[in-house]
Amino acid sequence: MGSQETEPRPSNIIQIDQNLLETRLDRLVAEKVAELLNAMLDAEADEIANAAKYERTGERKAYRAGHYDRSLTAKAGRLALKVPKLKGAVFESAVIERYRRREESVEEALIDMYLAGVSTRQVDDISQLLWGDRMPSQTLSDKLKKVYGEIEAWRTRPLEDEYPYVFMDGVWHKRSWGGSVENVSVLVAIGVNAEGHREVIGVAEGMKEDRDSWEQFVRSMIERGLKGVRLVVGDRCAGLVATVGSMLPKARYQRCMVHFMRNVLSRTPPTHREWASAALKAIFAMESRESALAKAEQVATEMESRRLKAAANCLREGVGETTTYLLDEFPDGHRRRIRTNNMFYGRGSRDWRYCWVLAWFSRVRAVVRRVVGDVR
């Protein structure tokens, strides 16, 4: 067989150096942003002086005295700015705060890296790569102290509204500390006010889910003004149930329906789990508490006939406090939302982010202690 002749490749193929292109584009963007900011600074100087540069007018209030160089680290990179100087007036810019060297979004991004567990050296390398500048350790310390102060103020704020419904639970969050990972408990309370707005009204980090911790947690909210509670929704935690009965005597307790169903199903063999799940859902589909309790007894009897005695006992033991939401004092339109505290876990709910905000608070404390010491 003869050798196949290959067509010669054309010599004029355009080859693009992607890294070089991106570098040039980044530089071009930074230059254009700097030009825009410098033009805005000059416009501000004209407004303060009440006259344009070199303009002859009797209404002039100040005179130009050149510029001074100043760098600003922004998302576009490190910008070289020329800030106007004035004679006869102080140049105060609305574009750039006095003495600011970094755009707020850049500082927030650096802090977010620390809070996400990135090491100091890695953050320095990333900031140098992205913006051509590093954040001094003192600046980071000051920023973290400010963040911690804002969180403390939010946690201890007065509770001025009445909250008829309060959802409570303990959220567990993994935290990196000293090279090891440990679980940290965050007690959380989400209140629903009379207008139906939900907000996090209580957070306590590093506490256990025992009675002493729950009492301390609820007492702190009462001291901040918690009032008007008609229903507390939570898991079957003995410490929480006892605390609600003693410290919120006018409130009823609703055991989380989702957790209760999981407890019953955990005592059900896999071969019967599909039937049991459908039967439990039928109980909580009832429109009155009496019919729900009657349906629960039927299901428990059927479970016993299927030799599911443990599941039947669990159902009979907990169905009463799990159907509190069906009492006549709670409106029909509220019942689907107050029968479970699953908002802490379900990403399908718009309130799932509350859980992660609170877990983030735990990480903030860890970072503050590691980087700047305990600021309390």
Image: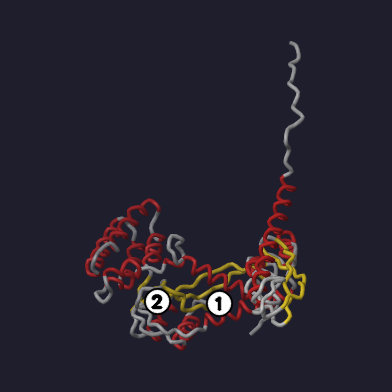
Name the residue type under label 2: Val
User: Which numbered tag is attached to residue 205?
Assistant: 1
Classify 229 as above or below 274.
below
Mark 2 or mark 1: which comes first in sequence?
2
Q: How far, Cα to Cα, is label 2 from label 1?
A: 18 Å
Is 343 on the left-hand or right-hand side of 365? left
Residue 141 placed where, x, y %? 70, 77
51 vs 187, nearest the viewer = 51
Count of numbered tags: 2
Residue in view at x 71 percent, y 58 percent: 31
Q: Position of residue 96 (x, y in %)?
A: 66, 72
Quarter of the figure that contains the C terminus: bottom right
Q: Which mark is residue 367?
A: none
**Mark 2 touches mark 1? (CB < 8 Å):** no
Q: Which residue is mark 2?
A: 166
* Quadrant (top left/top right/bottom left/bottom right) for the N terminus: top right
